[in-house]
Amino acid sequence: MSQITTHILDTSKGSPAKGVNVVLYQQHGDNWNEVGKGMTNEDGRISDLFTKETELVTGIYKLHFDTKRYFDETSVESFYPFVEIVFEIKNDRHYHVPLLLNPFGYSTYRGS
């Protein structure tokens, strides 16, 4: 399991959001560099955005979720074409960043 993991629950269906592309970026000044990516599995989870041997340095990161494609594939009208969650890594602990998603809203929290 990588140091950063995520999962998505589609709260409008009460089920995991499978097949969502997610990209992890690290901030460098005014730029964002891609450091990992993946697609949610049947359980709406990504546990391997990068190899478990990869150690991330402290800093600002963001997860970019391609929500438009997910809703378009199920013919559901939605408001947000993507969701970006920006957070700070302060140590070498595990960071789990869940996304609770529906076509017209979302929320997130620091998971375990």
Image: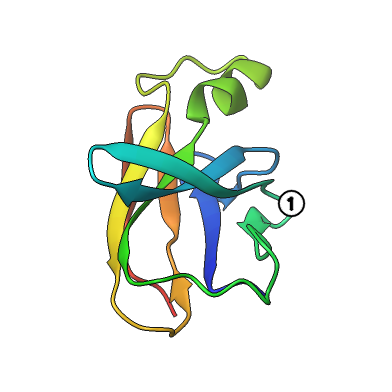
Q: Is residue 16 above or below residue 12?
A: below
Camera-nearest residue between 24 and 77 = 24
The residue tagged 1 is 41
Q: Which image quarter: residue 13?
A: top right
Q: Position of residue 30 (x, y in %)?
A: 23, 37
Image location of residue 107, percent across then percent down? 31, 50
Name the residue type under label 1.
Asn
Judge from the rendering whether residue 16 lies leftward or rightward of residue 104; answer left or right: right
Residue lying farthest to the front in this orientation: 29
Quarter of the rendering occupied by the N terminus: bottom right
Q: What colour-coding does the image apply? A: rainbow
Residue drawn 42% across the image and 28% down it: 82
Bin the neighbour count of mark 1 within 10 Å (Cα to Cα): few under 14, some 14-19, many 20 and up: some
The residue lying at 65 percent from left, 60 percent from top is 50
Q: Secondary structure at mark 1?
A: loop
Q: Would you identify the image quadrant in which residue 74 lies?
A: top right
- Identified at 33% across, 70% down, the residue is 110
Furthest residue toward right: 42
Quadrant housing the C terminus: bottom left
Q: Is residue 1 left or right of residue 76?
A: right
Left or right side of 61 for 35 = right
Please tell me which residue lies in front, 41 or 86.
86
Decide: is 90 above or below 68.
below
Residue at 54% in and 18% down: 76
Q: Give the mark count.
A: 1
Q: Position of residue 62 (x, y in %)?
A: 37, 49
Q: Is residue 26 left or right of residue 19?
A: left
Residue 11: percent from left, percent from top: 46, 46
